[in-house]
Amino acid sequence: IVLLFNMVAEGAGSSGDPSTSSSTLENEMTSLSKALVSVTKLNGANFDVWYAGLLSVLMVGTQLRRILATALNTFKEHMDKTLTEIVAAVKVAANLGTDETKYKEFNAVLFSIIYGSLSDCVEMVPSKLYGAKKVFGDGVVYLKHLADKFGPVGGTNQVLLNHNIMIE
């Protein structure tokens, strides 16, 4: 997380004073952590509410929050596409270019935010284990997994139409 905050601080035109940058980063991390506590936890049945909560916390505030919100908005627009297409779109939206180091730092922060906002309920245990064991640190892949499983493009949020067999 600190690496992404450093990356954003450099891009924001910090004064170069290390003590000022460090203090600003600590304040931002504390502020973001406090804000994320208020986000509704994903429990498997509330994907849209959870996603809106993440976006609402990230949309207001510092440059780091705006970058994360932009990336999440872009993900939402492309969540029904392939992972390769999503990654490319997120990289462009977050202005990461082709720098894989910056992308990995960004991705780790995104993973941390997502993993920390999942409920501890029984329904989420498989998804938490998947994150911890299979895609640790890869926020975009993890978010795609959650969207496919619980989101509007996944199977669990399909709207079922009431069909009355007695009428036919």
Image: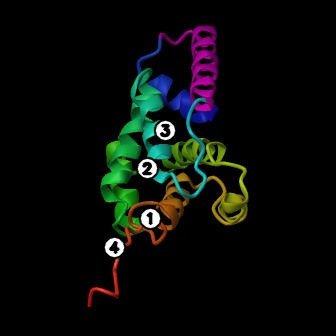
Read off the residue under disc 4: 161
**Dot 1 lies on which element?**
loop
Q: What is the magenta range? A: 15-37
Q: Residue furthest front?
A: 166
Read off the residue under disc 3: 54
| Horizontal side, residue 142 vs residue 125: left or right | left
At x 38% / y 49%, what residue is drawn? 91
2 in relation to 112, above or below: above
* Count of picture labels: 4
| Horizontal side, residue 88 vs residue 44: left or right | left
Q: Please check the rendered image and state whether residue 33 is part of the magenta-colored stretch, yes or no.
A: yes
At x 44% / y 64%, what residue is drawn? 157
Mark 3 / mark 1, whichever is N-terminal: 3
At x 34% / y 64%, what residue is drawn? 85
Question: Answer yes or no: do the residues labelled 2 and 4 have beta carbons within 8 Å?
Answer: no
Question: Answer yes or no: do the residues labelled 3 and 2 have beta carbons within 8 Å?
Answer: no
Mark 2 or 4: in front is 4
**Alpha carbons under labels 2 and 4: distance apart:** 20 Å
Q: Position of residue 41 (x, y in %)?
A: 60, 43
Read off the residue under disc 2: 48
Q: Position of residue 116 (x, y in %)?
A: 65, 43
Read off the residue under disc 1: 157
**Alpha carbons under labels 2 and 1: distance apart:** 10 Å
Q: Amino acid at mark 3?
A: Leu
| Horizontal side, residue 158 vs residue 126: left or right | left
